[in-house]
Amino acid sequence: MTAQTDAPGSVTTVYQVSGMSCGHCEGSVSGEISEIPGVTSVKAVAATGEVTVVSATPLDEEAVRAAVDEAGFELAVQA
């Protein structure tokens, strides 16, 4: 996971998600993460496993992990 502050009041975080292989996977992960309060944008890319999330404030990693799990995938463990 990498995070950076963009425009005032927004944070962009990139997560690694394992198991995504198609557009349907991307949609499932994006849909679940979009439901987390404060999330304004989600872009999942199956080819790289990257999910870019823009939110009003930094997100609780456990909330993101739970959303990814609900979609049927796994948030990669960060070293």
Image: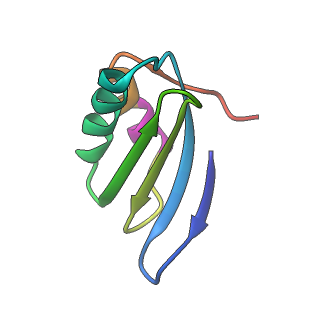
Residue 27 occupies which quadrant of the picture? top left
Residue at the image position 60 percent from the left and 27 percent from the top: 76
In the rendered image, residue 62 lying in the magenta stretch gets the answer yes
In this image, 77 relative to 37: left or right?
right
Locate the C terminus and report the quarter of the image it occupies.
top right
Q: Is residue 31 above or below residue 40?
A: above
Q: Is residue 73 above or below residue 30?
A: above
Q: Could you tell me residue 33's position as x and y percent?
A: 32, 41
Q: Is residue 64 above or below residue 38?
A: above
Q: Which one is nearer the viewer's eye here, 28 or 55?
A: 28
Q: Could you tell me residue 46's position as x and y percent?
A: 48, 27
In the rendered image, residue 67 lying in the magenta stretch gets the answer no
Residue at the image position 42 percent from the left and 60 percent from the top: 54
Locate the N terminus and report the quarter of the image it occupies.
top right
Q: Which one is nearer the viewer's eye here, 49 or 3?
A: 49
| Image: magenta residue range | 61-65
